[in-house]
Image (spheres, rainbow, N blue to C red):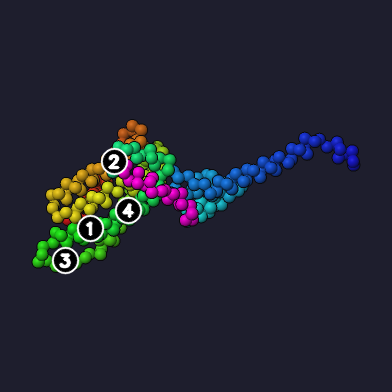
Amino acid sequence: MEAGYTSLPASQLAGSVPAIVAEENQGRAIVGTLHKTNLQTFPPGSSASGYQALGTPHGEDGQTTIAWNGLFNISSYQPYFNIDTDIMFDRLISSVYPMNDFYRKVDANPDLYGLVWISTTLVFILAVLGNWATYLMTKPDVSWNFDVNYVNWAACAIYGYVLAVPVAFYFLLRYFGSNAGLVQLWCIWGYSLFIFIPGALLLVIPVEILRWIIILCVGSASAYFITLNLKPYTDGHHDRILLVICAAVLQFALAIFIKMFFFA
């Protein structure tokens, strides 16, 4: 018995321990990736490395459950709002001056803070200034009442546009083989609405011809911003170029809608 133990090869005794250590290190590496978020993918945890249980193969119910947990977990969205004032201000300036290479600034670090802040500010500005513009254009002998429904219409129009349109173009660009990211598109469309905020302040001026000049300039600038930032996804394909043109037309149509509905 004693000779049997001593004749056991030492390589087998030494080889079993690193196997267990390697397995533990692999498990720790996978666990460490659970809290990492790829800012270019959405929803959070939809990638292969994130929110996946140990030993759960792809496509099983376990991964789907964990991915949904990441989708409804507020902490999963924290990296998308991790932006300071200086970066936010620089991106706002780049959205007004689109030649300042906005696409490259948000390529590796897109944020959703700009989308939420800009769209919410624009909703309340359109509701308040739309009523004020109506008051300034009302004749003195006609009674005027504040229309609170402007808030509902502005919220439905702005939030619906800035959320649904990028999703539609995301699937269309993916269909044509582009590597567009949903968060990147949301970021681009969110910042494209910033120019409407100073434009709405100027639309209060009670001169109809001047209002049309202002809204046409604002719509053209915003459509040009969308065109410049979607061109990297075209790669010279004619089908994708048509999508970029459609996006610019929709952006210009939003400007016309704002003028006709809130500042008529």
Earlier sequence position, callout 1 versus callout 2: 2
Earlier sequence position, callout 3 versus callout 2: 2
| Predominant secondary structure, magenta span | helix
Amino acid tagged 3? Trp
Q: Are marks 1 and 4 in contact (CB under 8 Å)?
A: no
Give the quarter of the image for residue 87. Answer: top left
Earlier sequence position, callout 1 versus callout 4: 4
Q: Residues within 10 Å of mark 3 (few under 14, many from 20)?
A: few
Q: Residues within 10 Å of mark 1 (few under 14, many from 20)?
A: some
Indicate the secondary structure of the residue bearing disc 1. helix
Viewer-nearest of discs 2 and 4: 2
On the rendered structure, is 16 left or right of 51? right
Q: On residue 144, which mark appears?
A: 3
Earlier sequence position, callout 4 versus callout 3: 4
Q: Mark 1 points at which residue?
A: 129
Residues in magenta, as a range: 73-94
User: How many marks can you see?
Assistant: 4
